Amino acid sequence: MTDIQKNRVHEMQRLGFSSRRIATALSLPEGTVKSHLARALRKGTLPAFDPTPHSSCRQCGVALDQVPSRKRRAFCSKTCRQRWWNSHLYLVDRSSKAIHHLTCPACGKTFTVYGSARRIYCSHPCYIRARYHKEDSDGR
Ligand SMILES: [Zn+2]
Ligand SMILES: [Zn+2]
């Protein structure tokens, strides 16, 4: 496993995901994830999963009011939810309806966006390139 993968395994485990779910999200064999977690736990490099409910927004850390009988809220707002998921795209279930697979018209690369955030280009440089390119061809 690479360091990035290890970090992601730790992060997902901290968030309470099962090893099967972690394995799927990172395209790793479940056994690899399990033995890595067991080893890290033994060595004490892995903080044990804290089952106490999050009472602050995962994205901005603002305190959340939890309604005891309802599902725990993890975010203060839709904006924070989308922002968080967009920076944790590898955690998103690929079959989720909230995930959109788009093709960048500037470089042709496919990229993924979570939620209703509408994006056309994969990155800001592509947006700039597409704009200048358009202006160039307009002048001819
Ligand atoms: Zn927030
Ligand atoms: Zn692009």
Image (spheres, rainbow, N blue to C red):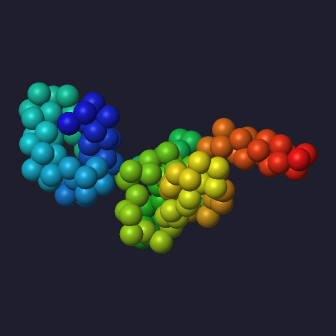
Q: Looking at the picture, how far across and down is residue 111, in whole percent?
A: 51, 54
Question: Which residue is painted at 73% across and 41% down in the image?
Answer: 128
Q: Is residue 50 visible?
A: no
Given residues 140 and 7, the one toward you in this image is 140
Given residues 70 and 59, the one toward you in this image is 59
Q: Looking at the picture, how far across and down is residue 39, in whole percent?
A: 9, 35
Q: Is residue 2 above or below residue 138?
A: above
Question: Which residue is painted at 20% across and 28% down in the image?
Answer: 45
Classify residue 27 as left or right of residue 90.
Answer: left
- Counting every numbered tag in the picture gives 0
Q: Quadrant of residue 3?
A: top left
Q: Looking at the picture, how far across and down is residue 139, in whole percent?
A: 90, 46
Q: Looking at the picture, how far across and down is residue 138, in whole percent?
A: 88, 50
Q: Quadrant of the N terminus?
A: top left
Given residues 26 and 121, the one toward you in this image is 121
Classify residue 46 as left or right of residue 56.
Answer: left
Q: Is residue 2 visible?
A: yes
Query: For the view shown, which residue lies furthest in the front direction?
Result: 140
Given residues 23 and 68, the one toward you in this image is 23
Classify residue 127 as left or right of residue 95.
Answer: right
Question: Which residue is painted at 79% across and 41% down in the image?
Answer: 132
Question: Which residue is painted at 31% across and 47% down in the image?
Answer: 12
Classify residue 7 as left or right of residue 31.
Answer: right
Query: For the view shown, which residue lies furthest in the right direction?
Result: 139
